Image (cartoon, grey):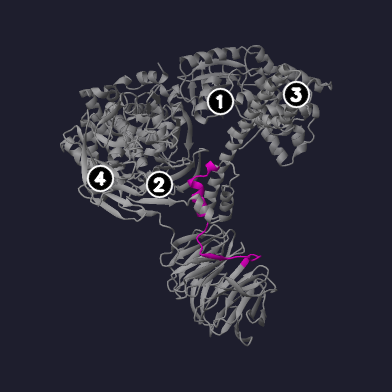
Amino acid sequence: MSSPNLCPVCGGALAASAPEGLCPKCLWASLLSPEAEDAADEPALSTGASAAPAAPEDSLGALGDYELLGEIARGGMGVVYRARQISLQRVVALKMIRTVRLPGEADMKRFRAEAEAVAGLEHPNIVPIYEVGEGDVRPYFTMKLVPGGSLADRLAHKSRCDACRNSPTARSDGGCADAQRTAGFIAKVARAVHHAHQRGILHRDLKPSNILLDERDEPLVTDFGLAKDLEADRELTLTGAVLGTPAYIAPEQAAGSKGLTTAADVYSLGAILYEMLTGQPPFRADTPLETLRQVMEQEPLSPSSIHGQADRDLETVCLKCLQKDPARRYGSAEALAEDLERWLRREPIQARRTSAWEKGLMWARRHKALTAFLLLALIAPVVIIAVLLVTDQKVRQERSAALESERKANLAARRAKAATKDALEAKERTHRTLYAADMLLADQALDQGNLALARTLVEAYRPTEAELSPDLIGFEWRYLWKQCQGAYLHALEGQSNAINCLGFSPDGKRLASADADGTIRVWDVDKRTVQASWSGLSGSLRRLRYSPDGNTLVVGSEEGTVDVLNVEEKQYLWTFRGHTPVRFLFTGNEIAVYDNPLPKTAMSNVKVFDWMRARETRSWPGLGDLEDVSPDGKVLVLSRAHPPVVELRNAGTGERLAILTNVPCNFLALSPDGQTIAVCGYQARELQLVKVHDQTSRVALQGHTGSINGLAFSPDSRLLVTASTDQSMRIWDVAQGREKARLLGHVDAVMDVGFSPDGRVIATAGKDRRVLFWPADYEPPRSVIISNVWPPLVLSPNGRILAARSGEGDKKNIALCDLHTRRRLELPESSDLIPEFFSADNGILFARGPVRSETLVPITRWDLAVPVLQAETTMLRLDSTNQVYGGTASPDGRYYAVNQVGVTTITLWNPLTGKVERQLEDHSVAWGLGSTLGFSPDGQKVVSLMWPNYLRLSSRSGFNNVTLTNVSRGIINHLVFSPDGTTIALASPDHTIRIWDASTFREVGVLSGHQQSVYCLAFSPDGRTLASCGGGGELKLWCWPARREVVALQDEGGPELHYVAFTSDGSTLLAGTWDGCVRVWRAPSLAEIDRQR
Amino acid sequence: MSWSDQFLRTRSTGQDFASTHWSVVLLAGQEHSPQSAAALEKLCQAYWYPLYSFTRRQGYGPHEAADLTQDFFSHLLATKALASVNREKGRFRSFLLASLKNLLANEWNRARCQKRGGGVPLLSLDEEAAESRYQLEPVDELTPDRIFERHWAETILSRALDRLRQECDGAEKTRRFDEVKMFLLGEKGNHSLAGAAARLNLSLAAVKGLVHRLRRRFRELIQDEIAQTVARPEEIDQEIRDLFAAFGG
């Protein structure tokens, strides 16, 4: 017995409450597993234990007259067993049809009829059917057991042979047929298929695995037409795929066409021939769906272009079978067989090659819109010239003829216009789809810190006067544009090369940078101008520092030189020439360098120079790689690779002060307070904080997706900054050991980073030829702007005031929050009230009170325009005592409806007077998470969702209702009209957003992408963006014109949301979280964006 | 008649689908008959723990969650909440969760709910047992919806297994049940049928038969339990698949 707390099947932990101590997940899985079903249908077992005969242990059971011996094959549509027929003592193949649902009487009847027809086929190349039967509940049939495997096995074997270049033996193998054998083989198969066709039986799924081979390698076709209808059910319900095997089915079959003909089988024969000639089927993509698309839309490559030795005539035969138009294929499988036999006899074949003109014509048929557009471009000038000629020369003599011409010209113009419109629409559609795809990519690029890509994608859609579809760009574009701007203070630009390293002068007034070309520039930090420059230094400059007195610059190169120079005075002081690589550091008035003459084999030497006099003062051979020096110059930090240790040594004596073991180090930085070492490991993205005095305290800092090029501590040791190839610069909180901010601004790798001496500014050097300055106290913009606000949230029409319940525990008053000033005002005595809506002029807030005397609902209002708020109450009289659970107001605030349990009439009140304005009979509202009652923007239509999935629309002209048959799980959570009133979007618990046309009242689209139930929806005021929040904390933006997801503002795992809304100026998106907060996402207006051009 | 109908008539408990609890509730609609009230009460009594765990997961304390669950049922049973569900059929599970979410979103209605129910508990909810069970649950990253679905599925399993055990009346049958119930999970684990046969002093074939019958009966009982909560027989299989997703399957 295994541990009582673990499931013996899945190994998962078992809860104490597990029923009967069994793993609920595995129990549930057993209900789904086909084994359970199969077992349940096995009569050998179901006869009961006492009656069960002592069956041999290897028997799988029995089915009628058959004893199942073993499984031969298992596919999507059935299981084939080796079985012994007890009465005749022969071994046969038994195929059990697998279906999702068990077949009904009609299905069985059809199966039997078809099976009997197939059983009547007698042909040497068709596998004979012996018997058709019905098991307990499933149909099966038995047939001759063919021992040689299938053509599919042979082809797979051949491709393996080819792969290992074992061709001489492969060629003699039956499966690796040469052209002669291939033609003969297919001819036999085609004759067998023709035999079935003559008896009215289509195969419908010819493919290599359905062609078996006997001992003499003779082909035997199997699986004729049987039970395809039953199987179709399975294929369609489970995978959404079309019946058949995508790589081999005819285009008309791929298109789901019902009336298939023998031409479909001819196509499949061609596809098999193709694979035998080239080693691959005519179409093969990553997904079955993509393969189907190719089958329908693309022409196959000619076999000779894949396999140079393919015979041209056989290629012609093969491509004739693969014609898209069934009428252009061979008229019968027999005709194909005859042409193949002609080829075998070296007679001319009857098929002919497709001419270029025909290919063009076929292309045009498939691309009608484009063809129309091209033809239009050719014809239009001709038409115009014709019209001119007619009017100029003949109009006086033949007026009637002219009129006729004009009519024709008009007709041509109309047609041309229609064609242009079609072409333009297609272009627009493509443009919309591309836009949505590019925004999604930009969002992902920003996520990964790839600002360069994000910026390119976003800028491509910047609106200009001549631009297409300016109405496409919505909140998402403006939001992404803002994200692409970077958070830096300013930039030093105008340099012609990538900048490799930088350093501040000790007074912080100058900054020196070195570029890849060997040029050093000294900048005035305040004026942002170049004070001095020095060019012509050789080597790739990697490290640049000011001397402690600020007069001298020291530059180290990748190649091993350290140059000491005074740039401003243009003085060259001295050079140390070491070996690869070299690094230097100041230790008080001296400079320490390390140098390794034999990299990777020996330890580095450390030498200390009096850098003013260029004189070596002391050296320690083989000490290790010098990594950093304490600010007072007294402690050296060194690293070694074997074993990976970091050592701290006295800079004067070389004596070891501390050793940190097991610290793999690529490079490191010591914090100015000497307490912490930040180490970049051998894997260049790894970063570790190690406490010098407590080696056990190590924190891994993770986040960079590219290698780290530079790191620096702030002067107060609280912050660490890192520069990375992933284009980002990150600020880390040293004490908490976590990322504080990720800063984007560079559009290429960030090469170096440094703090200004006062610790207020961070400078970064980029491969994008810029130095950027950042505020060291940067805080990411706070997305939470209000807390302690509880549902329902109500936003005023001008987007300025948010009303919600606020307070502790059960005692919650209504609070008004000004989103601009963040001021908050609590309405006294409102603890029993629920905020409902604002009047259209933002001046009045309405709230609903608890039901009084069973049928009266008090509606309280506050006039927000007067200085002293005073509540006034109107009573709405209900017809029923059923519970009220919400209310909805029309956009103009004229109508108000309460949602009441179990009442089938919606009453529209005037909220100010309490008078009934309209009653919508037979119209109720289901319980959803949000409002499932919606008014059209013009207030003329009301749509509501009735339990459980019944959508009803009332308008002045009557009402429509539709059952949402597609919504399989639960009820709709929220519904909302698009601002133009043409469509309704529904938030569905089946993880989708469903789109309904408000005039035709039909579902016109489904937006998929949420991982869980969708809770709440909101349209931006311009109607171009839809925001949706759903379970798991997801918050998404959708491009409404393209009907596609464009931005994920929050992924699964974010705080759970219950509410989304746009402010009326379209600048802000608000979302309410279940823990009582409001988060915002802002986007600048197009005018603001234009100003920053 | 569809195949599913036939199946339920002949192979399940022989009960007509029209008489399952949720069907009775749905059919009753506005009529609020004693039968429908009793049927609803039975369903509520069976499935309150998933609702309790959902409420707890939403951040309510044990007392609050028990109160809210109780209030919720009081409200459901006392008012005509079901009147609006008479036209189209839906699943009991979806209905309960949507209704509960609504109640929680309108949690300030609580005081009034209590007044309606008169503060008298309508169901016997063992708050202490529920909380100790909740405390024993692994603390994981599941969302409230998932927790609810998972406990719903577990409730169905428990009820079916309880019935299966009851049907194994008598000491010998109970012993056999205990010995072979492991095989309801399938035979992939470490447990061998041969071992069970030896312990029960039966032939291997006999144990195979026993296991087979147990599995088949278990399946029938699960289908019967689910049948009580859906409106149409063809929804049973879909419900099994939907609930499997709750286990991350």
Q: Are marks 2 and 3 in contact (CB under 8 Å)?
A: no
Q: How far apart are the two marked residues, 2 and 1, measured between alpha carbons?
A: 63 Å
Q: Are marks 3 and 1 in contact (CB under 8 Å)?
A: no
Pointer 4 or 1: first along the chain: 1
Q: Is residue A569 magenta?
A: no
Q: From mark 2 to mark 4, how far is it between C-alphas?
A: 22 Å
Mark toward the viewer: 2 or 4:
4
The disc label shown at residue A390, or none: 3
Sequence-first tag of 2 and 4? 4
Asked if labels 4 and 3 share a chain, the reply is yes
Q: Residue at x 41, y 64 (%)?
A: A736
Image quadrant occupied by the C terminus of chain A: bottom right
Secondary structure beneath dot 4 equals strand
Q: Quadrant of the N terminus of chain A?
A: top left
Query: Mark 1 highlights which residue?
Result: A80
Alpha carbon distance from label 4 to label 3? 76 Å
Reading the image, the residue beneath label 2 is A1063
Query: Which of these two is toward me, A313 or A1015?
Result: A1015
Whichever of callouts 3 and 1 sits on the residue coming sooner in the sequence is: 1
Q: In this picture, which residue range is highlighted in magenta?
A: A470-499
